[in-house]
Image (cartoon, helix red, strand yellow):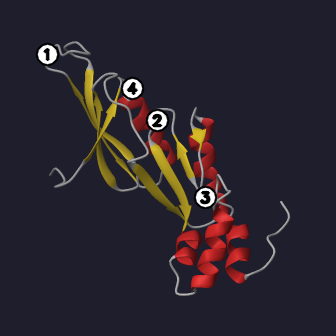
Amino acid sequence: MRPKNTVCLWYEGDAVEAATFYAKTFPDSAVGAIHRSPGDYPDGKEGDVLMVEFTVAGIPCLGLNGGPHFKHSQAFSFIISTDDQAETDRLWSAIIGNGGEESACGWCKDRWGLSWQITPRALMDAVSGSDRAAAKRVFEAMMPMKKIDIATIEAARLGQTPPAS
């Protein structure tokens, strides 16, 4: 049975490659059905891979090989909540190490231009907690970061000096 809501992601022609990377990288992710075009279309031929069904961290997606007409933007991103620094480091390194690029505050882009927020639960808990002074310290500690460092976030939450890197 098809899900009621599916995220459609546009690719230039490498949706299967992207879906395979996501399935290998993120827990609860998999590549599903691959659909070939029943006829020629502006950026492909009959028999080319047109769509791939996949899940990313339990979210149903459809990769559409639509050609070079549209690009991903940071207006859409996947937020992946991590439990510890090891998971944060692993996911960040997988994306960056596969041709991606770093951005700010836990954001990065994969090689296909899709934005990801690799966000430790500790960060979200601290900035959304009832202690507004701690939230401000954490927010200020996060702002210069690229990949989030949980030890620094925790030190800021507690009002302590961050550990030496």
Dot 3: element: helix
Sequence-wise, which precedes: disc 4 or disc 2? 4
Q: Nearer the viewer, mark 2 or mark 1?
A: 2
Q: Badge 2, how many Cα within 10 Å: few under 14, some, many 20+? A: some
Q: Residue at x 27, y 26 (%)?
A: 66
Q: Residue at x 14, y 52 (%)?
A: 1
The kind of residue tagged 3 is Glu
The kind of residue tagged 4 is Asp
Q: Which mark is residue 87?
A: 3
Q: Nearer the viewer, mark 3 or mark 2?
A: 2
- Residue under label 4, please give it: 14
Dot 4: element: loop
Q: CA distance from mark 3 to mark 1?
A: 43 Å
Q: Badge 1, how many Cα within 10 Å: few under 14, some, many 20+? A: few
The image shows residue 81, relative to residue 43, as above or below, that is: below
Q: Badge 3, how many Cα within 10 Å: few under 14, some, many 20+? A: some
Q: Residue at x 19, y 21 (%)?
A: 37
The kind of residue tagged 1 is Gly
The image shows residue 41, relative to residue 74, as above or below, that is: above
Q: In the visual, does 60 lie left or right of 150?
A: left
Sequence-wise, which precedes: disc 4 or disc 1? 4
Task: Give percent across and percent down for residue 143.
Answer: 63, 60
The image shows residue 117, relative to residue 74, as above or below, that is: below
Q: CA distance from mark 3 to mark 2?
A: 22 Å
- Residue under label 2, please give it: 113
The kind of residue tagged 2 is Gly
Sequence-wise, which precedes: disc 3 or disc 1? 1
Furthest residue in direction right, as rendered: 164
Q: CB atoms at circles 4 and 2 under 8 Å apart? A: no
- Residue under label 1, please give it: 39
